[in-house]
Amino acid sequence: MTPTPVADVRDARIAAAGATLVDGLTLTVGAGERWGIVGPSGAGKSLTAAAVAALLPPGTTAAGSIRVDGTELVGASASACAAVRGRGVALVAQDSAVALHPLLTVGRQLAGPLRRHQGLDRAAARARVPALLAEVDLPAEVARARPAQLSGGQRQRVALAGALACRPRLLVADEPTAALDPPVARALLDRLDRSLTATGTALLLVTHDLGVLAAVCEQVVVLAGGRVVESGPVRTVLAAPAHEVTRALVDAAALSVPEVTA
Ligand SMILES: Nc1ncnc2c1ncn2[C@@H]1O[C@H](COP(=O)(O)OP(=O)(O)OP(=O)(O)O)[C@@H](O)[C@H]1O
């Protein structure tokens, strides 16, 4: 029997203040698959990621169907959305400052989802923290730190550890390395790759970097103007882009990486 897709989006529409921002969105992410979302600025990538992560911003509405881990999110109550987060899907955003509470220690923040979603008591949740930190190559002492005492790369690792703490079937990552220097970004992506492989978690990754897309994802959807203009295997789409938006992205990426001649 084929497992339920982790995300099954059919003809979804996202709107705010009477304006349609994303329209006709159809996307199916199977168990363990790795999908990328690319497209120009304002294409609707972050809204799509937020919708699939059951975290649409206030003031936006969704129509059509967005099923995540078997639960229909369109029209779902706040508590139904909360139940899908953590167990079914988790989000890592570009700026971990948004996800992490500035005043709470890392240990308390990592224990939080375990208590909320897995029903662990305080002591049991705290006891799991060193292992969660080790999974993202951070020492156990980091549990006592507050976010401001960590580097940007360490904060993103903590955010990744928190997102994976409850073993969601799908990780949504919205430009998780955009605020990091290239070597720190590479190390985080390598960590992400190993964690996903170890846990069998699927990925929906928003990125503007086609190098990151090619390194991490197998499939891609290209968005422009709130619509899917092209989708398919990353290698095929990048090697022979069918839509002018994709061609422009590929051309721009080629320009930003000068050819090295021996
Ligand atoms: N909460 C919101 N309320 C109203 N409009 C919004 C909201 N969030 C995004 N938008 C609008 O929806 C459109 C898509 O935004 P989105 O952030 O998804 O684009 P994006 O592809 O992620 O862009 P970027 O690459 O610049 O981050 C934009 O026109 C944006 O201004």
Image: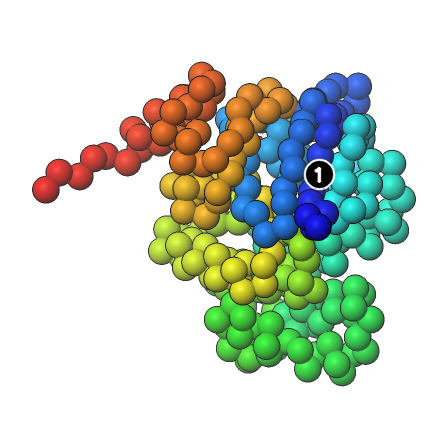
Question: Which amino acid, by three-letter code, is at mark 1?
Answer: Asp
Mark 1, secondary structure of its residue: strand
Q: Residue extending furthest left? A: 262
User: Left or right: 231 with respect to 113?
Assistant: left
200, 173: nearer the viewer = 200
User: Left or right: 221 with respect to 122?
Assistant: left
16, 10: nearer the viewer = 10
In the image, what residue occupies the spot 82% across and 36% down? Answer: 74
Say which residue label 1 marks.
8
Q: What is the x, y in percent for residue 179?
A: 48, 48
Above or below: residue 51 compared with residue 187: above
Above or below: residue 235 compared with residue 161: above
Q: What is the x, y in percent for residue 41?
A: 53, 28
In the image, what residue occupies the spot 41% across and 42% down? Answer: 214
User: Left or right: 42 with respect to 80?
Assistant: left
In the image, what residue occupies the spot 55% across and 79% down? Answer: 140
Above or below: residue 169 compared with residue 66: below
243, 20: nearer the viewer = 243
- Quadrant where the C terminus sits is top left
Q: What is the x, y in percent for residue 106?
A: 63, 70
11, 57: nearer the viewer = 11
